[in-house]
Amino acid sequence: MIPLRATNYKLSESWPPAVIIHHSACRFNIPELEMDKTTFQTDKLHNINYSKRRKETGFNFIVERVRNDFHVICSQPLMTQCEYQDIDEKYWRGVHICLMGNYNKDIPMNRMYKVLSYRILAPLMRLFIIKEEDILFHSTISNEDISCPGEFMNKEKLLMSLRNVLRRKAVTRRTS
């Protein structure tokens, strides 16, 4: 078990300007974390990160498939910075999401797009007033030649799923 080390976090002083999507093969090129398993792998990812003496994973959320569904795991507090040497510092304040797997080798399931849209992206867009064009792939903002979140990750499919979620009204409670 890795203790929460809140002193390692650099807090953002303003709202996130964007949402940046990665896959675990980007930062952790480890074969056993590449494909879906029947049990959670996020603990392995945290342990590997810790053994490499990194402060944090660099992701606010991790989306992981276990059996037939996808789960969203909070990896570090929302308003903390995720530092990447290959992207401009203004994106360190963004919300970074890791898709567990290697999407250069595996095709994302439709369910993953839906879970990513309604459990993370739509709420973040509503909360922080983030525009659709500010949902970015790591590869589009990197100053290195990378394919993160993978060649098989389809941004149009993701945006179509997100639009379907955003068309629905937000659920509100009645107080009476």
Image (spheres, grey):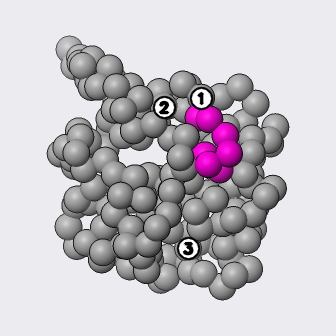
Return the residue at label 3.
56
- At label 3, the amino acid type is Glu
Vertical relation: 20 (above or below) 4: above
On screen, residue 63 versus residue 89, left or right, reads right
Q: Is residue 161 visible?
A: yes
Quick one: SS at disc 2? helix
Vertical relation: 173 (above or below) 2: above
Kindly indicate whether the residue at mark 1 contacts the one at mark 2 (C-beta within 8 angstroms): yes
Q: Nearer the viewer, mark 2 or mark 3?
A: 2
Quadrant housing the C terminus: top left
On screen, residue 172 versus residue 100, left or right, reads left
Kindly indicate the quadrant of the structure image that contains residue 152.
top right
- Residue 69 spot, x, y in % from top left: 65, 28
- At label 1, the amino acid type is Met
Q: Nearer the viewer, residue 54 or 78?
A: 54
Magenta span includes 93: no
Return the residue at label 1.
109
Q: Which is more N-terminal, label 3 or label 2?
A: 3
Q: Which is more N-terminal, label 1 or label 3?
A: 3
Quadrant housing the N terminus: bottom right
Q: Nearer the viewer, mark 3 or mark 1?
A: 1
- Residue 105 spot, x, y in % from top left: 68, 45
What segment is highlighted magenta in the picture?
102-108
- Magenta: predominant secondary structure element? loop
Vertical relation: 173 (above or below) 159: above
- Residue 158 spot, x, y in % from top left: 40, 33
Q: Is residue 73 visible?
A: no
Res. 113 mark: 2
Query: Marks 2/1: CA distance?
Result: 7 Å
Kindly indicate the quadrant of the structure image that contains residue 84.
bottom left
Furthest-front residue in view? 145
- At label 2, the amino acid type is Tyr
